[in-house]
Image (spheres, rainbow, N blue to C red):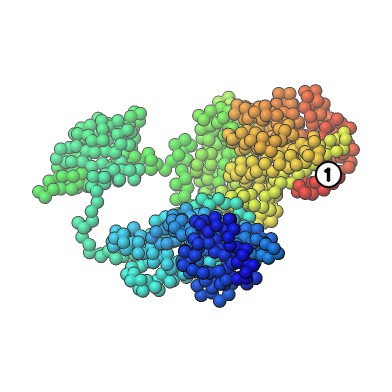
Amino acid sequence: MSNHDENLFSGTFLLEIVKELNANVYITDIETNHIVYMNDTMKKDFRLDHPEGKVCWQVLQENMSERCQFCRISELLQNGGKGCLWVEENTKTGKVYQNYDRLIENEGKKYFVQCSSDVTEFTKMSRTARTDELTSMLNRRAGKEKLIELIDMAKDKEKIITVVLCDVNQLKKINDLYGHIEGDRLLRYFSSIIRQNISKRDLVFRLSGDEFVLAFYDKDAKEAEKKVQWVKKQLKEEKNSFSVQYEVSFSYGLMEIYPEDQYILSDIISRADERMYLQKRDYHIKQAKMELQQVTENQAVTDFEYDKDHLYDALSGSVDDYVFVGNMKTGTFRYPPAMVEAFGLPGEVVENAAAFWSDLIHPHDEKAFLESNQEIADGRTNYHDIEYRAKNVKGEWIWLRCRGRMITNQEGEPYLFAGMITNQGKKDKTDHMTGLFNKYEFEGAVKEFLVNENAEKMGIMVLNLDSFKNINDFYDQSFGDEILRITAQKIQSMLPPAARLYRLDGDQFGIFMPGSDENEGLAVFGRIQRTFYKQQEHNGRKYFCTLSAGYVSYPKDGDNYLDLLKYAHYSLEYSKLMGKNRITLFSDDILYKKARTLELNQLLRESIDRGFIGFSVHYQPQIDSCTGEVYGAEALARWHCTEYGDVSPVEFIPLLEQNGLIVQLGKWVFEQAAHQCKKWSRVKDDFHMSVNLSYRQLLDGTILDFMQATLHEINLDPSKITMELTETYLIEENSTLRKIVDGMQDLGIQIAMDDFGKGYSSLFSLKTLPVDIVKIDRGFVKNINTDLFNATFVRTITELCHDVGKKVCLEGVETEIEYNAIKDKGIELIQGFFFGRPVPADVFESLFFQD
């Protein structure tokens, strides 16, 4: 150390204070690494008498041959000498220090200054709080925090992470057999093997008792699977070295997390747990089978123990039949609660039961009933099987079949009588409403045909009444039941001799047609279609109800009952989808479309679960017909599927409606559209945004609060938003829907009636419905320059709307000819391909806000 340095760092008032400070302070020359000053606290801590003039890394560290790799001098030189705070575990003292380093400059020379505090005890306490005591891994809380950090880091680096949830098998059994000490030793063994297979970038922690979480950074499911299988292999190979005498295994579930995924941590662990459960279930089934095989075949029945007091409850609660048991000495019997309720028994336990039942038995069956019971009582037979009628609490005669067995005591006297009473009505083959055989008989007939070696061909037709619910709603269910009965009679009268009609479920029927082919199936449906195509009448009440059908052929379409019935239903669904009142013959194309629908449903759910991945919002301009300028836009959902590419809204919107996911997507579209409207309103103050609202969304009780909260959050004027609803929903006499529509208008949101003129439209609705804008369906634009009806319709509706204070928007304007034909008809807004197709937001901006 130079005399200059010695004079500089001695004797000052400031250094006298630092000298006694309860923290380690030292200063070095950054060019030579020589210590120029150290306070007394640090000298005592490092047991140094005269460190000044010595090289810092030689006296403050162990086994160092050069400047410490973790030295912060280079970092401080790069950042201009700004201070840095860091933690160091010192190699000489073994203590943990929190260091504050910085550079100071004096008379043109730079010095390194470090002030450090001993945080060893705090670090130990912190590690203890974050560490699982048994396995020395991170505990649940610390592990979850680290996992969140790892996922965030992977997102920033655009890397995949695979999370694995592991559950040690049979831990409870090992605890029960060998004690909890051995169970703890198993967990330590398991954790040690896992650690050997985890890299520094990966993570492992103990989630709970026998559950562990592994997270593999930048590894997909296949790579993670290899790691897990390697752990399983090592558990088997190394168990002897750990003196483990039993089989060690675990179940696991994997969950891949991609950078674009929006899962929260609980969802990730929950999904991994679901997949682990499947493995766990299979493992337990396999174990149960192995244990069953180990049971000796000659094990005595007396070795089997069970709770006899609960046997009766278990039996009577698990079968449809009435289970009874009786004491032959006292004549006291026990019956299940269901039978007590059905036949008005005095209680579950009935004394002198034979006498009580004799009052309920039909007079024609009483003699046979009493004689059969007397044979059991006398011990002349030990088996009882008899059918009789008994009166239930409704006064109806019900056919019952009683089967029982009598057990004698050691003296050979009747002791116990037990068995089952079957309600024959439950086993009936006939549908009571229509008189047709039921679905079980239908299944039996088809299966019987299929096992016949001489069977050559056969057809199955499944029929369903179109809009049958309307009949029940318009009249009542009793009238609807009558229509089902009459419909069954009419269909039956049109069948060929060998064909049979069955009632399946609800308003669905099945026709079994042995020896028939597709042509005969089409002929039968043709007769049915012609009969039901016109309005029907029953008891002075008129109704209209067509039928749809699906048809399959054996052996062309399938060779087993389940496939044939499934394909018939697929074909029926297609008939409904294509407009009802028709028959569809099964084909591979139907199967492909059904498979596609099922897969699209799954892919839609995955896309929405993963933060609406693949979804986007496109915007189609709405033009002010007077100025020719953009008035606003309609927000339209678009979906790019990983499997099928761009999927049309015509296909995916109905699927979302069916599975209820339209509610979630609708909210997401509303949020996107609202934010976009806010952005574009800064460019064009009077910009408006239209958003479609489905029936399912209207039924969601949170829709109003959601809209209000969204608009309030971004400070968007509600009057800039227009919600589009079809006339069908608006005219429905539903107080809940009307309140929601009124509530939107109370917020200031505009309401548009979409697709006016499509299907059934009422001119009266133009006057009565609470809408601000009427959107005339695109169908009336086609050939409007030459089609007098279309031109007159558009002009008339526009005038009527103006008379009652409503604006008009005409959809579907695609050509200049169409635009010229309608631009002078007083329509306020025009929408169509002529002005622009639906496009992404950035394209919309370039087209309409380029200035």
- Residue 528 visible in the picture: no
Q: Residue at x 51, y 57 (%)?
A: 20
Q: Helix, strand or loop at disc 1?
A: helix
Q: Residue at x 76, y 44 (%)?
A: 619
Q: Which of the pair 619/401 is nearer the observer? A: 619
| Residue 589 percent location from the top left of the image | 64, 55
Q: In the image, what residue type sits under mark 1? A: Phe
Say whether residue 679 is left or right of residue 330: right
| Residue 847 percent location from the top left of the image | 83, 47
- Residue 395 visible in the picture: yes
Say whether residue 67 is left or right of residue 291: right
Q: Which of the pair 756/531 is nearer the observer? A: 756
Query: Measured along the vertical axis of the image, is residue 53 above or below residue 502?
Result: below
- Residue 824, quarter of picture: top right
| Residue 475 percent location from the top left of the image | 56, 27
Furthest residue toward bottom: 65
Q: Which of the pair 755/141 is nearer the observer? A: 141
Query: Measured along the vertical axis of the image, is residue 784 above or below residue 460?
Result: above
Question: Mark 1 sits on what residue?
Answer: 848
- Residue 351, quarter of picture: top left
- Label 1 CA crowd tier, 10 Å (few <14, some 14–19, many 20+): few
Q: Residue at x 58, y 24 (%)?
A: 540
Q: Quarter holding the C terminus?
A: top right
Q: Residue at x 34, y 45 (%)?
A: 319
| Residue 439 percent location from the top left of the image | 47, 45
Q: Which of the pair 692/526 is nearer the observer? A: 692
